[in-house]
Image: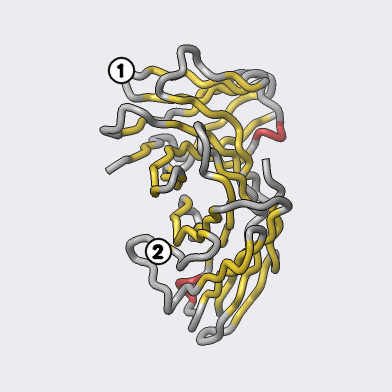
């Protein structure tokens, strides 16, 4: 069975600094995809970034980048130049096929990030 | 990406009653998903809802407790039946999950408190 592990319940960072949120995964499927979502206190889930197992380069989306280390089965999210609005819960997730070409998401426990001024 | 809305955004309900949550997508999608997020916890998938067929429930979730309707390609409902305080959670619907990446886009969630 696929599994996502986030070992940092909470992290804090100074505004304008970079922060890394850890995510490790376990799967026997050679083809997989990893996602990061942000959940502000309002509750909605915001898709941030995606990394495919066969992607040659680490994914980047603006201030978000993914440090993908396949051999270590880790997909850490790096947020550069932190902003106060980055304070939120962050979830790492992996897709799992449900048939018919569709996928469900398996989520980690999440990391609460607090950005301090 | 799809834009998804949910109603109600929050509700406080008495134990033993039922609440139906509506989820509307701004474009036609084949698959929709319903998740539960208990206080301080991560998201757990309740069921996948494919238009035109019965919903597929995850282990630990049953149709009698969480009946789902999927009448067309832009709409779905989740009913939380015979509620108890343990059902107090955020309920989120999502759409997507297809294609090479399979990302899902989420609605704003429904915060349910059962007293």
Q: Quadrant of the N terminus of chain B?
A: top right
Quick one: SS at disc 1?
loop
The mark found on residue B71 in the picture is none
Side (left or right) of B57 relative to B105: left
Of A46 and A79, the residue lying toward us = A46
Residue occupied by mark 2:
B57
The residue most toward the top is A56
Q: State whether residue A53 appears in this view.
A: yes
Of B68 and A45, the residue lying toward us = B68
Q: Quadrant of the C terminus of chain B?
A: bottom right
The residue most toward the bottom is B16
Residue at 39% x, 42% y: name it.
Answer: A96
- Rounded to the nearest angstrom, the CA distance separating label 2 from label 1 is 33 Å
Q: Are marks 2 and 1 in contact (CB under 8 Å)?
A: no
Residue at 53% x, 34% y: name it.
Answer: A36
Chain assignment, label 2? B
Report x, y in % for residue A58.
50, 16
Residue at 48% x, 65% y: name it.
Answer: B53
Of B112 and B76, the residue lying toward us = B76
Residue at 51% x, 61% y: name it.
Answer: B49
Q: Based on the displayed image, in which of its 4 quarters is residue A62 positioned?
A: top right
Side (left or right) of B81 relative to B56: right
Q: Residues within 10 Å of mark 2 (few under 14, many from 20)?
A: some
Report x, y in % for residue B71.
61, 69
The mark found on residue A71 in the picture is 1
Q: Based on the displayed image, in which of its 4 quarters is residue B2 positioned?
A: top right
In this picture, is B11 found above or below B51?
below
In this picture, is B29 found above or below A79?
below
Report x, y in % for residue B94.
58, 52
């Amino acid at each position: 069975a696929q599994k996502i592990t986030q070992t940092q319940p909470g992290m804090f960072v100074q505004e304008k600094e970079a922060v890394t949120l850890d995510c490790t995964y376990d799967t026997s499927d050679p083809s997989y995809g990893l996602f990061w979502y942000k959940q502000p206190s309002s509750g909605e889930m915001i898709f941030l970034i995606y990394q495919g197992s066969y992607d040659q380069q680490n994914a980047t989306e603006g201030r978000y980048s993914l440090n993908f280390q396949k051999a270590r089965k880790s997909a850490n999210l790096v947020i550069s130049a932190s902003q106060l609005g980055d304070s939120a819960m962050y979830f790492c997730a992996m897709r799992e096929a449900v048939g018919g070409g569709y996928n469900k998401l398996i989520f980690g426990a999440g990391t609460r990030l607090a950005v301090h001024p | 990406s799809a834009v998804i809305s949910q109603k109600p955004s929050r509700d406080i309900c008495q134990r033993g009653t039922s609440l139906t949550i509506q989820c509307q997508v701004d474009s036609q999608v084949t698959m929709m998903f319903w998740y539960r997020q208990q206080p301080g916890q991560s998201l757990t998938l309740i069921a996948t809802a494919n238009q035109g067929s019965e919903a597929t429930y995850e282990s630990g979730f049953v149709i009698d407790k969480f009946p789902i309707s999927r009448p067309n390609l832009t709409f779905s409902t989740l009913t939380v039946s015979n509620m108890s305080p343990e059902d107090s959670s955020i309920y989120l619907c999502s759409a997507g999950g297809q294609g090479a990446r399979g990302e899902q886009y989420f609605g704003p969630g429904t915060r349910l408190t059962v007293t």
